[in-house]
Image: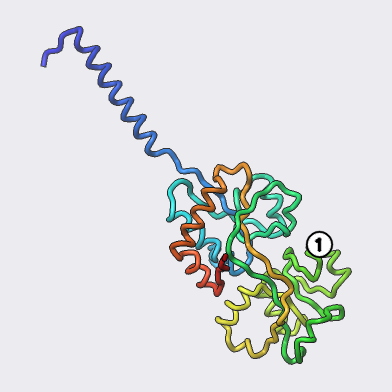
């Protein structure tokens, strides 16, 4: 094909413009989805660290469900520790955290909370061989108590400082709820407050141990879980609330919670 001298530059210009438009359009299509980092620490049954290093639990299940119900953002799990989560939040290590409560030392930190219609709490347990009846739990003064280090307990005025706690009570510190139960079964402690949802799950897996334990009728505390969200996060609270409502309406949130023996609270 013969091209006139004046036509060749015009053709090159058209070709270059077309290619530039295609590259721009492709660039728009592959723009990365914003990531929302979700902090979590060992707090069964909400976050469980498995022996192979994987994290499982209701928090991880809800993260997966949120990623399936929308495509605006991508939720990613970030591990932290119960003691250091405040500093990690302050330096921006994560954007949000599930299953938190404003009364757990967050009042002095700039935060916002999105309600979750899930309640839980801690109930006391003891060996039936030691605790003949419910009166055993009425006075903890002279009893050894297994506490998960870093957890907030109402009977201790939500104090988490080990030195302060040891001045008031005979404390045996453990790392998680499972260790709290085992400290009772192995007679290392007289009494232990245990997260109720975890206790239910544990006894389902270990039914032979239920007859050995006396469970307190009066809980140490009840609390309603919330989602902690940074006020300056790319994720807007209204959007998060909307996606949670979608999971509630389609029954997915109740299904995931039921897997761990947790029931959603209903609002009138």
Task: Answer left or right for 206 relative to 213.
Answer: left
Residue lying at the far right in this picture: please name it.
Answer: 167
Q: Where residue 236 sits in the image (x, y, percent)?
A: 55, 45
Residue lying at the far left in this picture: please name it.
Answer: 1
Quarter of the picture containing the C terminus is bottom right
Quarter of the picture containing the N terminus is top left
x 45%, y 41%: residue: 32
Establish if 104 lies above or below 220. Answer: above
Q: Where residue 72 sits in the image (x, y, percent)?
A: 45, 46
Task: Answer left or right for 73 relative to 186.
Answer: left
Q: Where residue 117 sits in the image (x, y, percent)?
A: 58, 63
Callout 1: SS? loop
Establish if 44 lies above or below 105. Answer: below
Quadrant position of residue 266? bottom right
- Near mark 1 (Cα within 10 A), the count class, few <14, some 14-19 or many ≥20, is few
Residue corresponding to mark 1 = 161
Quadrant position of residue 126? bottom right
* Colour mapping used in the image: rainbow
Decide which of 154, 87 is in the foreground and name it. Answer: 154
x 53%, y 61%: residue: 60
Establish if 28 lies above or below 153. Answer: above
x 62%, y 41%: residue: 232
Residue lying at the far top in this picture: please name it.
Answer: 6
Q: Where residue 174 sits in the image (x, y, percent)?
A: 72, 71
Q: How many marks?
A: 1
């Amino acid at each position: 094909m013969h091209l006139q001298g004046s036509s060749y530059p015009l053709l090159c210009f058209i070709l270059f413009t077309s290619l530039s438009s295609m590259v721009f359009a492709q660039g728009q299509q592959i723009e990365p989805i914003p990531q929302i980092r979700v902090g979590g620490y060992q707090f069964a049954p909400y976050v469980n660290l498995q022996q192979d290093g994987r994290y499982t639990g209701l928090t991880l299940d809800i993260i997966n469900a949120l990623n399936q119900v929308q495509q605006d953002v991508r939720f990613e799990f970030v591990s932290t520790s119960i003691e250091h989560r405040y500093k990690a939040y302050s330096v921006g290590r994560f954007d949000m955290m599930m299953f938190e409560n404003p009364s757990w030392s967050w009042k002095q930190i700039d935060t916002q909370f999105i309600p979750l219609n899930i309640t839980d709490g801690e109930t006391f347990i003891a060996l039936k061989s030691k605790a003949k009846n419910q009166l055993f739990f009425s006075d903890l003064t002279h009893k050894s108590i297994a506490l998960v280090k870093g957890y907030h307990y109402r009977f201790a005025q939500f104090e988490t400082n080990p030195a302060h706690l040891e001045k008031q009570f005979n404390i045996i510190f453990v790392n998680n709820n499972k260790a709290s139960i085992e400290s009772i079964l192995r007679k290392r402690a007289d009494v232990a407050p245990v997260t109720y949802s975890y206790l239910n799950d544990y006894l389902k897996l270990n039914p032979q141990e239920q007859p050995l334990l006396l469970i307190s009728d009066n809980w140490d505390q009840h609390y309603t879980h919330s989602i902690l969200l940074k006020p300056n996060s790319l994720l807007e609270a209204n959007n998060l609330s909307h996606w949670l409502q979608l999971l509630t309406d389609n029954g997915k949130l109740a299904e995931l919670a039921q897997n761990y023996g947790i029931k959603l609270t209903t609002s009138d």
